[in-house]
Image (cartoon, rainbow, N blue to C red):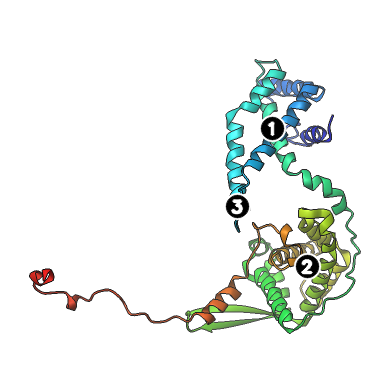
Amino acid sequence: MSPFTRQIFESLLLDDLFMEKIEAPTLSFILFLQEERQQLFNLCLYNDKIASMLEKWKNDIKNIASKLIPKKKGSLWMTTWVSHLEISLNNYLCSGIWYLEFQKIILQNHSSAQRLVAYFLIRKVIEETFKDDFYENRNLQERADPNLTPKKIINLNQAESQKFSYIIGWVLFKLLKRDHVMNSHPKFRLMHTLFEALCKEKVEYVVETKSQITNIIPGPEFTQFMHHLESLVIDLFEKHNELGPNILHYVKNSLLSNTPLNQMFITILKTSAEVELGDEEFGFIYERCITIYMRSRQKTWRDVNNYIPEKGTVSLRESLKTMRSNNSPIENKKSSFMKKTNLPTNPAHALE
């Protein structure tokens, strides 16, 4: 049995719905269906033809995905490719070709559980096909050092420091006002108090655009923590050649499991204000901070830009709006519509 086929059956064994770990009414029909499902699973597990069929399904799915890759790749080609891939996979599932292949091997034509087992198999094949690269690099990700410290703290020049300060403020702005996961937490008001003590809020009203811009100015303690965080990220990115497209997963998992960084973050929060929060709440805040920061910095790690996914990146829209409003002031353009007073009173004059 190949590693891929073994992974399919292992994932089925861990599936709560397939393995009857979900409580259901004890009806005679359901009990009969469960017995048939168990018999079919045992039959598939020790059938070499089923293993070959699963490999064929995997190759068919890969061919579908490769044919949809455009020859000319634009700036958002991956988003379009994912959309077309989803449609093609749904069409493949609805066609029933895979089920006919399953029926040719399993000759129980009157089994009511046959289609159910076949559907579970094809779904697991699709999942494992696109998770293949992740499983290959999972061991490297699990070996992330939880006690890793940065080799050198970054030292930014004035221009880079201003940009990085804005990014830190943007992270705080999301945590304070725009992160729905954070805002829905039962103790959000206490968390809000902690972050308010770490920054200053400055609201500017732009007369030209008749709008207001909220700028979050981070304090020195939180800025120091973010410099420490960015220094650690730069060290973690050294494995980008080894991990390839999974580098962002590796970086995020390493940051979340890093004990010194986590302790530094909790210490800063506890010293900012006297608020009673437990370890679970502090861990939740740390996870949200890392997640938002990873989104904000994806377009700025230029050394491994080829590995940065397009979908999911977040642009700093407020800075872009400010820049555009400064470079292109609004001008009062004269209306090109004809006034009513300029229309001829006599319709015959319009034909002259």
Q: Position of residue 1 (x, y in %)?
A: 84, 29
Looking at the picture, how far across and down is residue 281, in whole percent? 77, 63
Residue type, numbered disc 3: Lys
Residue closest to the eye, 260 or 206: 206
Residue 73 tag number: none
Task: Tell which circle, 2 or 1, labels the residue nearer the N-terminal end.
Answer: 1
Q: Position of residue 257 (x, y in %)?
A: 84, 60
The picture quadrant where one finds residue 30 is: top right
The residue sitting at 65% across, 72% down in the picture is: 173
- On the rendered structure, is 46 left or right of 110? right
Label 2 SS: loop
Mark 1 touches mark 3? (CB < 8 Å)? no
Nearest to viewer (mark 1 / mark 3): 3
| Residue 72 position (above or below residue 323) | above
Label 2 belongs to which residue?
Answer: 277
Residue type at mark 1 is Ile
Could you tell me if residue 114 is visible in this image? Answer: no
Name the front one of labels 3 and 2: 3
In the picture, measured across the screen, residue 85 lies left or right of residue 162, that is left
Q: Which residue is mark 1?
A: 122
Mark-to-mark CA distance, 3 and 2: 52 Å
User: Which mark is first along the chain, 2 or 3?
Assistant: 3
Location of residue 164 with respect to 141 vertically, above or below:
below
